[in-house]
Amino acid sequence: MFDVSTITEMKIHQHSYWNPIIQFQLSEDTYPHWNIFCIEEGIFEYQVMDQKGEAQFGDIIFCPPNIPLKRKAITPLKFHFLRFSFKNIEHYHLPIGKIKILDTDRLSSTYTHLRSMAFNETKLSKRWKAHLIYDLLQLYNMENQLLTIDNQPKIKDPVIAKAIQQMHEQAFTNITIQNIASNFGLSSVQFTRRFQASIGIPPIEYLTLLRLRKARTLLLETDYTIDDIASRCGYSNGFYFSRIFSKKMKMSPSNFRKLHRI
């Protein structure tokens, strides 16, 4: 998660739309401002610092100022390229590498608006473009903070699909991400990368969503103690459960029960 609350006065320096491009003229380039690649169609390989992989529709690649961006087209591409800067922002406020937008209908609509303004350099169009990019940043944050088990995207990776099934079946035991990864012959790092590429959040975050959904139900529909609920939701003790719950829900389990119980 990254903080966009302190972003002020986004300035668009360049917006180009490529439709299509078969291959990049340069295998890498460096830009004086933050830059993003918003892919409409096709697949390309990228590397920004230690972040690398493949990107396609739904993915946005972020690269900081003066950092080389390596890229190679795998298939013909349609994409938006934008350079921008902010006042009152440090590098850590934005992601580096790939983020995934889950609401692809909303993303398609944004790209339609951007296409209509491609290469338009008027002050008004730049303000509109800044609004659209800021909106995508907020949308990404919202999706990752409010993602539920019931609105997960279609999973194309068969290993991750099976892993999620296992997580649903064993979420309330003492299962760990390392256990799940080893079941599929992957290291924890490999599994986490593949899971996040498919779902948009790390596996531990998904496991926490499963557990907290059950915890909320038990808090509201039973008289179980906090320790009992912790045990029934896969946590070793009530203290650790309360700390996780409070961090995610912005209130303690006891306060949640008092506030929402009918």
Image (cartoon, rainbow, N blue to C red):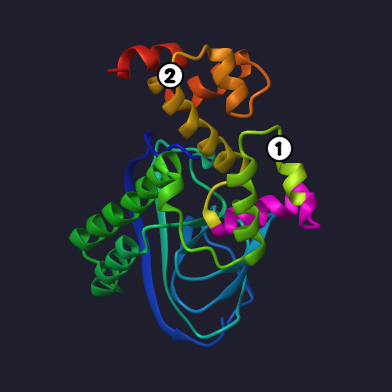
Q: Position of residue 202 (x, y in %)?
A: 60, 46
Q: Can residue 252 be seen in this snapshot?
A: no
Residue at label 1? 175
Residue drawn where x is 45% and y is 54% of the image: 152
Is residue 96 inside the magenta stretch? no
Residue drawn where x is 36% and y is 58% of the image: 103
Residue at label 2? 222
Badge 2 marks a residue whose secondary structure is loop
Residue drawn where x is 65% and y is 50% of the image: 166
Looking at the image, residue 149 sits to the left or right of residue 229; the answer is left
Residue range in magenta is 182-198
Could you tell me the amino acid type at mark 2? Thr
Magenta portion: prevailing SS class: helix
Q: Quadrant of residue 238?
A: top right
Badge 1 marks a residue whose secondary structure is loop
Query: Is the Cβ of the residue at disc 1 closer than 8 Å to that at disc 2?
Result: no
Considering only order in the chain, which callout, 2 or 1, is on the residue closer to the N terminus? Answer: 1
Above or below 237: residue 212: below
